[in-house]
Image (cartoon, rainbow, N blue to C red):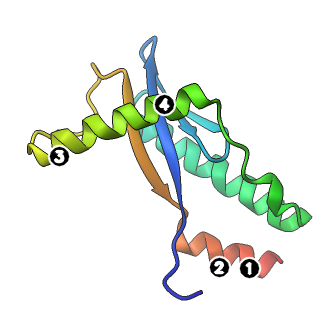
Amino acid sequence: MPGQTFSVRVLGLHEDGEWCAIALDMSLRGYGATFEEALDELRDAIEAQVSFAVQRNTLDEIWIPADPQYVELYQQARQKSMRQYLERKDDGVGADEEYAASDMPLPRATKHRFESLA
């Protein structure tokens, strides 16, 4: 379908000086010193899982929901982020933050690569 995009909800948790990015719709994780680094690692994990599912024709196994507690934290972080954005106080995710919320689009180039594998 032309123009259709897909995104994955991501919760970032900052613990013990490291960020963990959790794909709530896929129950995958990425880690890094910053939230952005954790997102990069998570993006690689998502691409690998989707690629594997396409190759094995197991697309139903892509979507494994994370624990509901993480979904609740995502919603709280998303609301805080939106409030900061609307109040024009959005400076990105700081090292002193405990949680962060993001939506990660599935890269369009990935879609074409997966189509060639099918």
Secondary element under disc 4, as helix, strand or loop, is helix
- Sequence order check, earlier mark of 4 and 2: 4
Tell me how far mark 1 sits from mark 4, CA to CA: 34 Å
| Of labels 3 and 4, the one closer to you | 4
Q: Is residue 54 toward the left or the right of residue 41 in the image?
A: right
Q: Which residue type carries mark 2? A: His
Q: Give whichever of discs 3 and 4 has the lower sequence position.
A: 4
User: Which residue was labeled with disc 4?
Assistant: 72
> In the rendered image, which quarter is residue 47 located in?
bottom right
Q: Position of residue 106 (x, y in %)?
A: 55, 63
Note whether 107 is above or below 18 in the view shown: below
Question: Tag 4: Cα neighbours inside 10 Å, few (<14), some, or many (≥20)?
Answer: few
Q: Which residue is mark 2?
A: 112
Q: Residues within 10 Å of mark 1 (few under 14, many from 20)?
A: few
> Can you identify the residue that label 3 sits on?
85
Mark 1 or mark 3: name the one nearer the start of the chain: 3
